[in-house]
Image: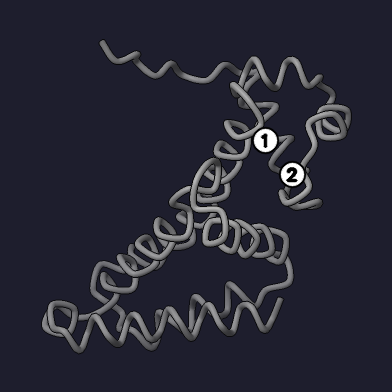
Amino acid sequence: MPQEATAPSARQIELLEAAYRYALAHGLADLSLRPLATAIGSSPRVLMFLFGNKDGLVRALLERARVDELALLDRLGRAGQPIGLVPAVERVWAWLAADEHRPLLRLWAEAYARSLVEPEGAWAGFARATVDDWLAVLAACQPQPERDGEAGAARRTLALAVLRGALLDLL
């Protein structure tokens, strides 16, 4: 029988948020539990207990980063009427180009690249999931006739590729 997922404890949420702030500042590539635990006022043993292992913690951090990413995307999709692909790309770019988003975007770029190079383990599926998230939001910004056509899919894929490339250049 599958185990039911339990709601995270207040301490787990608190440590995840602290670890997320740490990851935004230091990245995930060389993440070591001892320095992380010291920096956030915990211990490696507590982190292992709460997240299972280092991969579990990295997965939780990637999911937490996705929450911030999806918050931006959700704002684009709330317009009621599709705003069109060009205005959507302009809004996304304005958000991406804002200095205050650099830590999240560096973390995203690192996770995206690691997901491509290390497709198993903690990074598994991150790149695919983020592409799917962004394409779905861009599709929602397109008027219905454009959204459903092959040309509309190609345009939003191109728009996403341009945004990602420009973001990498910016970073």
Task: State the residue position of label 1.
Answer: 17
> Which one is nearer the viewer's eye here, 41 or 150?
150
Task: State the residue position of label 2.
Answer: 21
**Residue at (25%, 79%) from the top-left corner?**
142
The quadrant the N terminus occupies is: top left
Three-letter code for the amino acid on which mark 2 is drawn: Arg
| Outermost residue, top side | 1
The quadrant the C terminus occupies is: bottom right
Circle 1 sits in a helix, a strand or a loop, which is it?
helix
In the image, 147: left or right of 20?
left
User: In the picture, residue 43 is in which quadrant?
Assistant: top right
Measured along the vertical axis of the image, is residue 170 above or below residue 130?
A: below
User: In the picture, residue 137 is in which quadrant?
Assistant: bottom left
Callouts 1 and 2 close, C-beta under 8 Å? yes
Three-letter code for the amino acid on which mark 1 is drawn: Glu
Measured along the vertical axis of the image, is residue 75 above or below residue 42?
A: below
> Which one is nearer the viewer's eye here, 156 or 2?
2
Residue 99: where, in percent of width, then height?
73, 71
